Image (cartoon, rainbow, N blue to C red):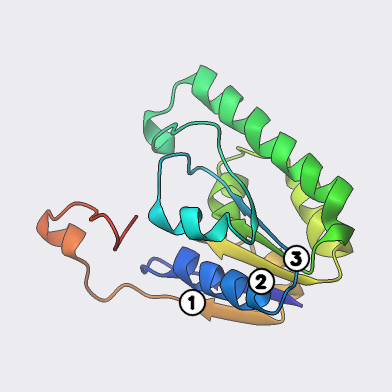
Amino acid sequence: MIHIYCGDGKGKTTASIGLSVRMAGYGKKVLFVQFLKGSYTGELEILKENVKVMRCDKNYGFFRSMSDENKENITKNHNDNLSYVIKNMNDFDMIVLDEIFVAYNYGLCDKDMVREIVKSYIGELVLTGRDPDEWFIEKADYVSEIKKIKHPYDRGITAREGVEF
């Protein structure tokens, strides 16, 4: 089954982590791959105990502030992780591709590899991020849009440890 958590609201990654914890709690094998994220976040410390976590090798920042060199480096990192997924997908009961739609839409990953995973994987596949292409929506079994109504960032409050990261 294919799950999508999309939209401009807070909670897409949190929802995918919740599913990962639930699946791992039943003794199932979970692969959690994060795109565009490389800085420390507390939830990954807990996940790493029972879930294979793959992510960026460092924090490259937001797309609009990345240099061409950083875009090349992050794309290579993403494609290496996608290659791992393709080669090992049958070893996992659940695969999460967190923030895949952002990487996909900005051309920071190989789109053919992403589509191959979506077409070939037979377990629970969880995809998150903003603005999924209609192709993904059509393939999905679950689509949940998380809509921002209000957020502290709108008032200038930056991300807080334990809440946003």
Cα separation between marks 1 and 3: 26 Å
Q: Quadrant of residue 101?
A: bottom right
Q: Position of residue 162 (x, y in %)?
A: 30, 60
Q: Amino acid at mark 3?
A: Lys
Relative side of 31 to 103, left or right: right
Q: Position of residue 19 (x, y in %)?
A: 59, 75
Q: Quadrant of the N terminus?
A: bottom right
Which residue is at the front of the view, 40 or 83?
Answer: 40
Residue found 85% across the figure and 64% down from its top? 121
Relative side of 119 to 71, left or right: right
Query: Looking at the image, do the residues carrying marks 3 and 2 touch, with CB atoms under 8 Å apart?
Result: yes
Q: Which residue is mark 1?
A: 145
Relative side of 134 to 8, left or right: right
Within 10 angstroms of label 3, few (less than 14), some, or many (20 or more) residues? some
Q: Position of residue 50 (x, y in %)?
A: 63, 62
Q: Amino acid at mark 2?
A: Ala
Q: Which residue is mark 3?
A: 29
Q: Which residue is mark 2?
A: 24
Q: Amino acid at mark 1?
A: Glu
Cα separation between marks 2 and 1: 24 Å
- What secondary structure is marked by label 2? helix
Give the mark nearest the N terminus, 3 or 2. Answer: 2
- What secondary structure is marked by label 3? loop
